[in-house]
Amino acid sequence: MIAFWILAPIMVIAALGILFVRKAVHAALLLAVVMLSLAVLYLVLEAPFLFAVQIIVYTGAILMLFLFVLMLVGVDASDSVVETIRGQRVLATVLGLLLGVVLVLALGQVSLGTVRGLTEANGGGNIQGLADIMFSRYVFAFETTSALLITAAMGAMVLAHRERLVPKPTQASMAAQRVRDYGDKGLHLGPLPPPGVFARHNAVDTPALLPDGTASEASISRVLAARGTVRSAPALAENIQAMQRSIDGKPATGPGPAPATTEEDPA
């Protein structure tokens, strides 16, 4: 009873959240909360087989399949509010209310008979008792449910299938399209050249060099160009050579940073 009164409100709130959240991924995560709570209830009712099936099959397999499908399809909030069939929300509301009325009337007329208790029901073992009931009294309902699940899977595959109206673009066709865009609109043929590298650190103020050795204007930031802080390639080459000589222990000549010394400046 303690587990039920703790988990029941959590399950109801999560179930209501599945109906009202706008993102499909959030609805799937709330469904995981409901399934895990139901598994705990199975465990406290001394039904270890149903507990394991609920965790391994429903939560671990089917729900993860839902999440993979959502990630592959990429359904977002803008897609979930679009009605693919006109009037489907009103029809779903009416059918949901009718289903609720049918369930209430059916449950109100059910005669359960004498309650045997969990000890007697699990006398020969929980797994053995469940298998005896499932494949004897309820074998037709069990097989019908399996057929419905297969039909639902096939229907989901048919609904998710999309015919390609245009051929898939290849690398050659995309390259030809970039050339046409360059001729018609003047767009760049490819990505902009990256900045150069100064010593062992990336420097955004170092222009990239073209094959003829000149600096590429496309690789220079407009902000740095306006500030006048763009470094020139010849100066960078001299600085790099001076730093290399200082690392090798040779005296630096020419422009660039001199090697560091430990003697004090007499001035």
Image: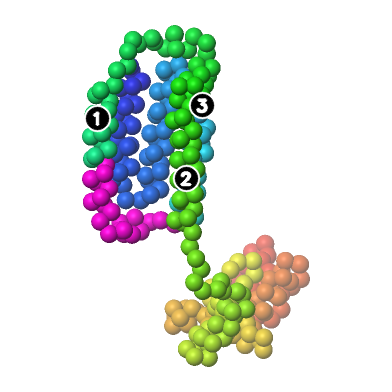
Badge 2 amino acid: Thr
**Lateral position of residue 148 relative to residue 267, left or right:** left
**Lateral position of residue 241 relative to residue 10, left or right:** right
Residue found at x 76% / y 67%: 248
Q: Residues within 10 Å of mark 3 (few under 14, many from 20)?
A: some
Residue found at x 51% / y 74%: 166
Q: Which residues are drawn in magenta?
A: 73-96
Residue 91 lies within the magenta run: yes
Lower sequence index among marks 2 and 3: 3
Q: Secondary structure at mark 2?
A: helix
Residue found at x 72% / y 70%: 244
Q: CA distance from mark 1 to mark 2?
A: 27 Å
- Residue 150 seen in this snapshot: yes
Find residue 151 and name its label: 2
Badge 3 amino acid: Ala
Q: List x then y, in percent, for residue 95.
A: 26, 44
Q: List x then y, in percent, for residue 81.
A: 30, 56
> Which residue occupies the extreme bottom position in the image?
183
Q: Is residue 111 above or below residue 21?
A: above
Badge 1 amino acid: Val
- Residue 78 seen in this snapshot: no
Q: CA distance from mark 1 to mark 3?
A: 30 Å
Find residue 104 and name its label: 1
Quadrant of the snapshot with the N terminus: top left
Find residue 170 and name its label: none
**Lateral position of residue 267 relative to residue 52, left or right:** right
Q: List x then y, in percent, for residue 168.
A: 56, 71
Residue highlighted by disc 3:
52
Q: Is residue 39 above or below residue 125?
A: below
Q: Residues within 10 Å of mark 2 (few under 14, many from 20)?
A: few
Lower sequence index among marks 1 and 2: 1
Q: Secondary structure at mark 1?
A: helix
